[in-house]
Image: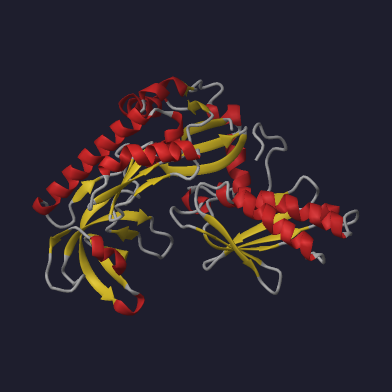
Amino acid sequence: MKRKILIEKTEGQVRTFLLENDIVVEIHCASSDEKGTEGHKIGDIYIGKVKNIVRNIGAAFIEIESGVNCYYDMKDAENAIFTEKTGKKPLCIGDELVVQISREAVKTKAPTVTSNISLTGRYAVLTHGNTRIGVSSKLPRKMRDEYREKLQSYQNDRFGIIVRTNAKDVSIREVEEEIRKLKEEYERITSAAPTRTCFSCLKSAPPSYITDLKNVYTEGLDEIVIGDAELYARIHSFFTAEFPDGAGMLRLCDDPDFPLGKRYGTETILEKALREKVWLRNGGYLVIQPTEALTVIDVNSGKSIGKEKNEAGIMKINLEAAREAAHQIRLRNLSGIIIVDFINLEDKENTAALLREFRRCLAQDPIQATLVDITPLNLVEVTRKKVRKPLYETVQRRYNSEPRVSEESIPM
């Protein structure tokens, strides 16, 4: 897998484009505010106060700053680090505890917080509340066994360790060094918490474009092209401190006559990723419509209807649609319930083959995406874990529905 990252600052945002084999597979947009204020970011750790408990849904609402109430699953209270306890029940109104933002606010929904604190490095994650030693299933079996054996000395009843897929590219010594730093950070946070007042921020996560760089698989990553000198300096500083061997991948592209956006066609890429209609190579097309409750993806035969009326022709359209639907789900960061309406097939074996291919494509997504079932109405149900806002909610400007140019420098 050949990977490249493009990062540009434009229209008050930092936009990150991840390419795999020269195809854009993810787009992330974040505020370019020099103070790094993007609201409450995933990974921020606060001392919050329980404001309300709704037992019939097993949830509480925790205030992390005046007027900002966050959803909290009461099951997490079992592992909570309390700084102030007001009653004997596992969770009581008025309790103060350490929480971490695990999901951004989406439309009218509040941010979600958890007591199961996670400290994420490039190669490992330290998990409070989950004390097991885990290793990414994407690592070779021999390497997984070696990590489990080496990391047994970290087994304890306070926190666990998960080795990430990126550990494949470095030595065990480097991974252990990162785990040591994560452990030190964990001890600093847990020891400082009892001395801090309510609403204190114990840890502010880095800007999301930095976090995105941590989360990208390093396998095949050979270039990070940055279109702004100040942004380049910040990212270079991050790499120097945390990933010095990767600093050589950074490249500044700030020529005013031929900027990054013009060189790679990022404007057109983003515009296409926000359109309702997505054309397929065989003449069919997808219509993607997010709603409040779910997202609908409708598959249409389009220009191919005259020549593709048979079962084999419909199957061909559906297979390409399945691959493109999985691509668009990841590209647009669609989440929650997703319904895909493929063109109806008569042959049950073809339907089974289509679902296998769709499931295979969804499995390539780093965020958990699951093909649940196909309904009696032949609608395919997919769920994808909600972590961040979808792309259409993060882009600050609107785009016309029709393309302004016919050729793009990077295919999507």
Is residue 14 in sight in this rendering? no
Which is more toward the observer, 412 or 187?
187
Q: How is the image coloured?
A: secondary structure
Q: Quadrant of the C terminus?
A: top right
Q: Residue at x 70, y 55 (%)?
A: 286
Q: Where in the figure is residue 380, as x and y percent of width and height?
A: 65, 65
Q: Residue at x 38, y 36 (%)?
A: 122
Left or right position of 208 against 293: left
Q: Residue at x 52, y 37 (%)?
A: 17
Which is more toward the observer, 157 or 215?
157
Left or right position of 403 against 218: right
Q: Residue at x 32, y 71 (%)?
A: 59
Q: Where in the figure is residue 359, as x and y percent of width and height?
A: 63, 55
Q: Residue furthest left?
A: 195
> Disc count in the image?
0
Q: Where in the figure is residue 327, as x and y percent of width and height?
A: 62, 47
Is residue 6 in sight in this rendering? yes
Q: Where in the figure is residue 318, as x and y percent of width and height?
A: 75, 55
Q: Quadrant of the N terminus?
A: top right
Which is more toward the observer, 381 or 411?
381
- Residue 197 image-quadrant placement: bottom left
- Residue 161 image-quadrant placement: top left
